[in-house]
Image (cartoon, rainbow, N blue to C red):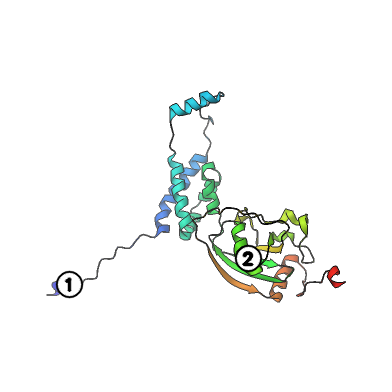
């Protein structure tokens, strides 16, 4: 009887799906090792056979036929999985040497860019002239163009994003093309935004040229954005003062032309 009861009321068997990040780790470790070997130059550094005559080169390639590259196929497969899951990207960044090996192997450039996407980071956007700002927690945002779209509802109107080095000692931004050396162009990877005190900082100023439309770098990668803090004028002035290294008034000075 006890055996019958234990069989009848035994808990159902549950088949848990493997965690994608955990399942990807052995593949990523092997990929990192293979990329290091592929990036290492051979002893003689011999090139593939080629001809200076374009016709003979074309005939040679046709006779040789298409060559498959298993390593490139593996890279493409991992890139697709990395785009789909932030957890897999976190696991990939934890694999020692993977990002460095991808950066030194030409066919893995897309993988290197993907690993450089600043997931789970806080971005501080400050508008010095308006003494306003916002902190955003971002995941899956790859380019400055995407950051612009996320900031548009906050700051409205056309605007230009600047690197923090553009801020002058009086907490103002250069006008016109004077500050073009510090512009953050839409096609730039978001990883180019510098970190200051542990968070990435951008400055919002007037637009000198219309923003260019650029395609998404990784269109299949889901984007997550959360507002961490909306800065009032006092908090914005304090943040600008830390960037300037000098006190910043809460109210920006009135331009001489407007005062007149």
Number of residues whose C-alpha sits closer than 10 Å to that of mark 2, classed few (under 14), some (14–19) or many (20 or more) = few
Q: Nearer the viewer, residue 83 or 246?
A: 83
Q: Residue at x 52, y 39 (%)?
A: 40
Number of the front mark, 1 or 2: 2
Tell me the number on the disc at residue 152. Answer: 2
Q: Residue at x 75, y 66 (%)?
A: 244
Helix, strand or loop under label 2: helix
Picture quadrant where residue 212 is located: bottom right
| Residue found at the far right of this picture | 260
- In the picture, the quarter occupied by the N terminus is bottom left
* CB contact under 8 Å: marks 1 and 2: no
Q: Is residue 77 above or below residue 227?
A: above
Helix, strand or loop under label 1: helix
Q: Is residue 20 above or below residue 34?
A: below
Q: Nearer the viewer, residue 22 or 129?
A: 129
Tell me the number on the disc at residue 8. Answer: 1
Locate residue 207, reporting x and y percent. Answer: 71, 60
Locate residue 18, reporting x and y percent. Answer: 36, 59
Picture quadrant where residue 24 is located: bottom left
Q: Nearer the viewer, residue 2 or 108?
A: 108
Residue 84 visible in rendering: yes
Locate residue 162, reporting x and y percent. Answer: 70, 59
- In the picture, the quarter occupied by the C terminus is bottom right
Residue 97 visible in rendering: no
Tell me the number on the disc at residue 176. Answer: none
> Distance from label 1 to label 2 (Cα)?
61 Å
| Residue found at the far left of this picture | 1
Q: Choose the circle earlier in sequence order: 1 or 2.
A: 1
């Amino acid at each position: 009887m006890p055996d019958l009861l234990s069989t009848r009321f035994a808990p159902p068997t549950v088949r848990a799906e493997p965690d994608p990040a955990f399942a990807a780790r052995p593949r990523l470790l092997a990929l990192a090792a293979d990329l290091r070997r592929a990036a290492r130059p051979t002893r003689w550094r011999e090139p593939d056979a080629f001809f200076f005559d374009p016709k003979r080169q074309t005939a040679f390639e046709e006779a040789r036929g298409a060559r498959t590259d298993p390593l490139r196929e593996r890279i493409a497969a991992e890139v697709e999985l990395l785009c789909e899951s932030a957890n897999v990207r976190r696991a990939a960044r934890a694999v020692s040497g993977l990002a460095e090996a991808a950066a030194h192997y030409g066919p893995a450039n897309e993988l290197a860019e993907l690993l450089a996407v600043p997931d789970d980071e806080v971005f501080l956007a400050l508008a010095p002239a308006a003494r306003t700002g916002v902190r955003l927690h971002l995941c899956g945002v790859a380019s400055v163009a995407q950051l612009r779209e996320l900031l548009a509802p906050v700051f409205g109107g056309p605007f230009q994003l600047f690197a923090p080095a553009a801020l002058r000692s009086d907490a103002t931004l250069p006008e016109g093309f004077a500050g073009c050396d510090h512009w953050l162009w839409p096609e730039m990877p978001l990883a180019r935004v510098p970190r200051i005190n542990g968070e990435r900082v951008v400055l919002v100023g007037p637009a000198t040229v219309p923003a260019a439309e650029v395609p998404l770098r990784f269109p299949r990668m889901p984007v997550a954005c959360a507002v961490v803090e909306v800065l009032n004028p006092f908090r914005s002035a304090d943040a600008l003062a830390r960037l300037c290294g000098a006190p910043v008034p809460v109210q920006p000075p009135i331009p001489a032309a407007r005062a007149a």
